[in-house]
Image (spheres, rainbow, N blue to C red):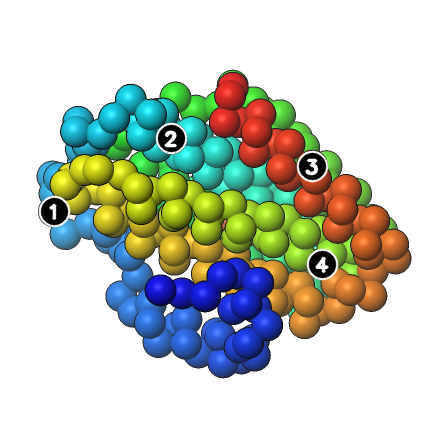
Amino acid sequence: MLPSLAIRRSIFSPTLRRSLATASRTPLSSDAYTKPVNPNEPAISSTPQDVTPEQREALEAALRIDQAGEVAANYIYMGQMAILSRDRKTKELLQEMKDQEQKHLDVMNKLQAQHDVRPTVLWEVAKVAGFGLGAVTALMGREAAMACTEAVETVIGEHYDDQLKEMDQFSTSHPSIPLLKEVIKEFRDDELEHLDTAVQNYSQRAPAHALLSTVIGGGCKIAIELCRRF
Ligand SMILES: [Fe+2]
Ligand SMILES: [Fe+2]
């Protein structure tokens, strides 16, 4: 069993974590969706019918939140890139993370359709709020933009961990659930890499770093609760 998020962050250096992650993630679980061998495979084309009503509700809430979160993440990076793209190195860094967020969103869109989950009604709000958060923090400077990434990815990483614990309790033999858990683990590890990247790029030198982290982290938690319900 993996140690908790906080412990993993502290006991492995970023470089070691990155190489461990890369070594253990070839091929990627998300390949099942991005490079399907057989599109009719039950694990990627059907949803479990043998879960309890509570578990169905938890599955739907999880996918609705994750899909909205990946939409917001894409727009956060778009907002940051709109302001910070003049610096080539920063642009490349942001583009690399944005490309991963786009893959996360593409897979979440497929999972949402597969499990017949209604998207959040706050879809458009997620786009505007994400872009605004990215742009405003970028206007405060490169370090503040990185502090935004650090705060968001901390909450999202923990949130993905919580979902995995919840899905461990699912009483189903359907093959989509073990695959979903592996995809969530993969995405969680991607988000932790983004977090590392932000810290390595001096997120903690941002003005009012503690305040920024608290406000942005708190905002993310509220957004998660709103998407769970709506
Ligand atoms: Fe993501
Ligand atoms: Fe991310």
For marks 3 and 4, the one nearer the N-term is 4
Report the side of 41 relative to 98 (left or right). Answer: left
User: Mark 1 falls on what kind of element?
Assistant: loop
The residues tagged by marks 4 and 2 sit, at their Cα atoms, a distance apart of 32 Å
The answer to whether one can see residue 81 in this image is no
The residues tagged by marks 1 and 2 sit, at their Cα atoms, a distance apart of 28 Å
Circles 3 and 2, Cβ within 8 Å, touching? The answer is no
Check disc 3 and report the residue beneath it: 219
Circles 1 and 2, Cβ within 8 Å, touching? The answer is no
Quadrant of the snapshot with the N terminus: bottom left
Q: x%, y% of residue 228?
A: 50, 27
Q: x%, y% of residue 14?
A: 56, 75
**Quadrant hosting residue 208:** bottom right
Check disc 4 and report the residue beneath it: 146
For marks 3 and 1, the one nearer the N-term is 1
Image point (82%, 66%), residue name: 205
Between 78 and 110, the one nearer to me in the picture? 110
The answer to whether one can see residue 184 in this image is yes
| Foreground: disc 1 or disc 2 | 2
For marks 1 and 4, the one nearer the N-term is 1
| Foreground: disc 1 or disc 4 | 4
Mark linked to residue 188: none
Check disc 2 and report the residue beneath it: 58
Report the side of 57 relative to 18 (left or right). Answer: left
Check disc 1 and report the residue beneath it: 38
Q: x%, y% of residue 138?
A: 77, 51
User: Mark 3 falls on what kind of element?
Assistant: helix
Between 131 and 23, the one nearer to me in the picture? 23
For marks 1 and 2, the one nearer the N-term is 1
Q: What residue type is labelled 1?
A: Asn
